[in-house]
DNA sequence: GTAATTGCAAATACTTTGCCACGTA
DNA sequence: TACGTGGCAAAGTATTTGCAATTAC
């Protein structure tokens, strides 16, 4: 079963209907494999001229509610959305100049602290977001 | 020398003029000691009815440029601004329900990874942002 | 005096909602 | 058929800019 099918199944189990828009959204997010803004998503080939911005927005909202998508801050004015894959956690390296976003493959060093915080504060549904910001080689060179 | 004076001095050294607005902004940020939105800042006693939103916005912009203030994402629609104090790094614990923001006092476990990334990728001016999100005890209880 | 800074108002960017038509189950 | 979903358009919220008046140096 492809990743898209698996996601659609998961969405269906969560009570969502299988629609073209949902399929296109999953395809787009899975293909890019990085957080994307609403604007990026709606101008992506799979979605553009097929789905309205409002539709995509509401899909993302529903998926966030079902825990299948997460909304990230990432410093920009626009919000970023990313697929939440079971067992997978990603941190990002972001160039403050050109805006490139790359996942970091090193193991995330924060999980232990997360456990400590969970115990100490009693917070539930705890998760974290870790981003590194800086200027990439290219941007550093060009100024 | 008070913290405000020290900040004003630093700003002056960076080429900014000493104005009422700047003084009020520093006072407000230092007093609250946590990231604040533009809206919060302009409705804060020190600034409200004295400074226009645009003024505060532009001050924050300049201070970001001088490395004295940092803009954070924090998941909300609005951006958050925080003083960047030399030698001090803060991570935050945020309740996704009531929106409370608390600094975490545990030592940040990310610096080593940050060094590795700096070496491996050649990124300059690298820094990171780490936030924990969840529901606080109170909010967990009330639903 | 000169240039940075400010306030007001308007423009822009992004998000969110209302409403009715449509498609899925 | 019934209700979740979609498209369009409009409203809402936050940010950003233009410009003339003001203020710090």
Image (tube, coloured by chain):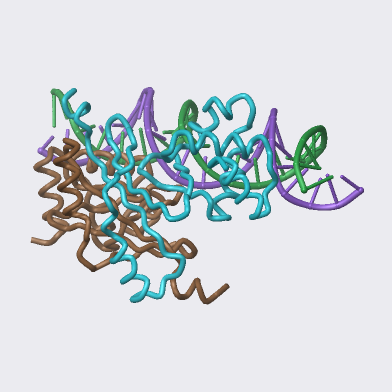
Chain colours: A cyan, B brown, C green, D purple
Residue B46, position as x, y percentages in the image: 31, 57
Residue A133, position as x, y percentages in the image: 26, 42
B113 and B39: which is toward the camera: B113
Q: At 60% across and 42% down in the image, what residue appears?
A: A5
Quadrant of res A142: top left
Image quadrant containing the C terminus of chain B: bottom right
Q: At 32% across and 61% down in the image, what residue appears?
A: B92
Q: At 37% across and 71% down in the image, what residue appears?
A: A118
Residue B130, position as x, y percentages in the image: 30, 55
B87 and B45: which is toward the camera: B87
Quadrant of res A111: bottom left
B79 and B45: which is toward the camera: B79
Residue A16, position as x, y percentages in the image: 67, 49
Q: Is residue D15 left or right of residue A46?
A: left
Image quadrant containing the N terminus of chain B: bottom left
- The correct choice, above or below, for B7 with respect to A39 in the image is below
């Amino acid at each position: 079963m492809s990743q898209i099918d698996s996601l659609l199944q998961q969405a269906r189990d969560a009570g969502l209907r299988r629609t073209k828009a949902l399929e296109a959204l999953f395809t787009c997010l899975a293909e890019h494999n990085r957080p994307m803004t609403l604007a990026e998503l709606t101008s992506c080939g799979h979605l553009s001229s097929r789905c309205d911005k409002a539709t995509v927005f509401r899909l993302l909202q529903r998926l966030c509610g079902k825990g299948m998508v997460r909304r990230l801050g990432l410093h920009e004015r626009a919000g970023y959305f990313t697929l939440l894959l079971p067992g997978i956690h990603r941190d990002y390296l972001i160039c403050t100049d050109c805006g490139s976003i790359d996942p970091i493959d090193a193991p995330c060093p924060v999980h232990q602290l997360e456990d400590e915080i969970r115990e100490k504060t009693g917070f539930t549904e705890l998760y974290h977001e870790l981003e590194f910001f800086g200027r990439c080689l290219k941007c550093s060179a060009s100024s």
